Amino acid sequence: MGLLSFVMGYVAPSFLIVSPLTSYADQIYSIHRTKSSTGFSLDIPLIMLVASVLKVFYWYGARFDVALLIQACIMIGVQIVLLKVALDNRPPPSFKGGAESVPFVGAREGELGVKRPWNFWQWRSPKPYWEFLTWFTATLTFLQIFVGKVPQYQALLGYVGLAIEATLPIPQMLANYRAKSCKGFRFSVLANWLFGDVMKMGFFFLADGESVPWAFKLCGIFQFACDIYLGVQYWQFGEGPAAGALEEGRWRMNGEKDVRLA
């Protein structure tokens, strides 16, 4: 029991804090080294930045464990660097069309039957990305000043932020299902995700007192279930030959490498 307490009290929080660095450093380095972000989804920085900023503001009301706050702050910094590197190394528009003619692969208009208003997060110029993040943070700051102490608003911040983050594995699951193959989805990545889930769940449910709100626990359960289902898909489909549909989902597989430890 003493060993378990040590792991959950010191090892798990330390793992959570450094997970943004260990998860995204390889992706940042790979884009910088190859000078190309082809195949990387810019939706990943969007999801993680929005979710992490919401968690930071949620902390002011919920006062959850400091390790989770530090993790969110580090995640914001890492995602800003990742977004900057990805935008700086995007392939130029192709005159012949194809994957390089859109801001990022897999975001083509109507792919999921939904057209993004105003080409949201598909802009060619880097400026709108930073403007959106600035206005988003400024709006949350304004709301924090005037309604930040309202319990319902505090709870809304937590559940919305964590629910957004929990959607991250869904595109991977859909891509595997459509392709009937997990080709390109490394087993080591899946093992890393599951190990991170085990550490998170242990920390969430074995932490002392009310240091971890139920919003974290519910979203953690959902993410763990998604990763287990990814494991079932890996067992069911394996890495056999895939149809052309896998090409559509490859941006998700490449872009989501080791990102779910956070």
Image (spheres, grey):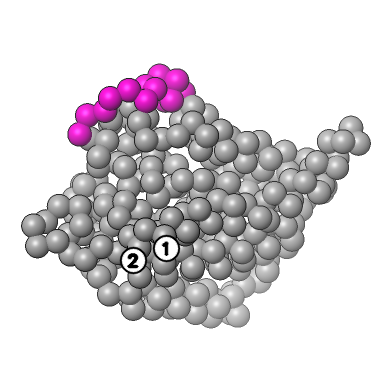
What number of labels is visible? Answer: 2
The answer, for residue 63, to whether it is visible in the render is yes
Extreme-front residue of the structure = 33
Q: Which residues are magenta?
A: 232-244
Left or right, 17 with respect to 211, comes to left
Question: Does dot 1 land on a helix, a strand or a loop?
Answer: helix
CB contact under 8 Å: marks 2 and 1: yes
Instruction: Check disc 1: other Cα within 10 Å, few if <14, some if 14-19, many if 20+.
Output: some
The answer, for residue 160, to whether it is visible in the render is no
Instruction: Check disc 2: other Cα within 10 Å, few if <14, some if 14-19, many if 20+.
Output: some
Left or right, 229 with respect to 199, comes to left
Mark closer to the chain start, 2 or 1 = 1
Nearer to the camera, 59 or 184? 184
Q: Is residue 205 above or below residue 134?
A: above
Nearer to the camera, 147 or 94? 94
Nearer to the camera, 114 or 9? 9
Residue 168 falls inside the magenta stretch? no
- What x and y, as percent, mark residue 252? 36, 45
Residue drawn at the location 17% of the way across and 59% of the way down: 101
Left or right, 112 with respect to 169, comes to left
- What x and y, as percent, mark residue 53? 55, 66
Per the rendering, the mark at residue 89 is 2
Gap between marks 2 and 1, in whole Å? 8 Å
On-image quarter of the N terminus: top right
The amino acid type of the residue labelled 2 equals Asn
Extreme-top residue of the structure = 236
Per the rendering, the mark at residue 32 is 1
The amino acid type of the residue labelled 1 equals His
- What x and y, as percent, mark residue 26? 50, 53
Residue drawn at the location 44% of the way across and 47% of the way down: 256
